[in-house]
Amino acid sequence: VDFTLESPAGRLLVSERRRADGLHTVEPTEGGDYRLCFDNSFSAVSEKLVFLELLLDGGAGASRLEAAEPDDALDVRIEDIKDSIETMRGRLERSIQLQTLLRAFEARDRRLQESNRGRVDFWSALNAGALLLVPLLQVLSLRSLFPAERRPRT
């Protein structure tokens, strides 16, 4: 899959061609909407699964603690707790996304495995039938080549 990332001004920040995976870190230098583009025109026949994870890190406000008044320090602590809870919620959402992705992979692999099992069962049964039929045909063909002699009873 081809991948491009453009800034709001239209500058090309990242461009990759025919890659199966990639990891990019981009520092946003300007405000606005960044443009992501995934292109599958190279091989539109084969199916592809694209997983995109976008992590946005806000700046840590360490400087606000330096000039804090005693009453403000309590507010800062509450804000820090809220930030920690929000970070934890984001990580839990990411965990749910990854588990959903792994479930999709597991379902695809299970379906492929069951399909292969059906094929193996069919060809095994066919080979077992051939193993039983070939000796029977050999015995019949040998009996037809050598007719049994009939002896008179005495």
Image (cartoon, helix red, strand yellow):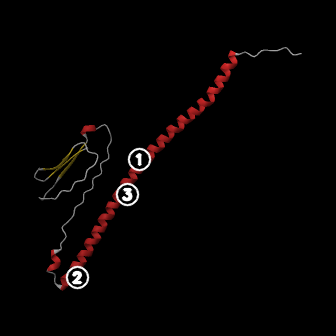
x 20%, y 56%: residue: 25
Q: Amino acid at mark 3?
A: Gln
Q: Amino acid at mark 1?
A: Arg
SS under mark 1:
helix
Labels 2 and 3: the sequence-earlier one: 2
Image check: 62 left or right of 107? Answer: left
Q: Residue at x 29, y 71 (%)?
A: 85
Frontmost residue, 27 versus 84: 27
Quadrant housing residue 47: top left
The residue at the point 22 percent across, 54 percent down is 24
Choose top left, top right, bottom left or bottom right for residue 58.
bottom left
Which residue does the numbered mark 2 point to in the structure image? 74
Mark 3 and mark 1 lie on one chain; the one further toward the N terminus is 3
Which circle marks residue 134 in the picture? none
Q: Is residue 73 above or below residue 115?
A: below
Crowd band around label 1 with a 10 angstrom C-alpha radius: few (<14), some (14–19), many (20+): few
Q: Which residue is mark 1?
A: 108
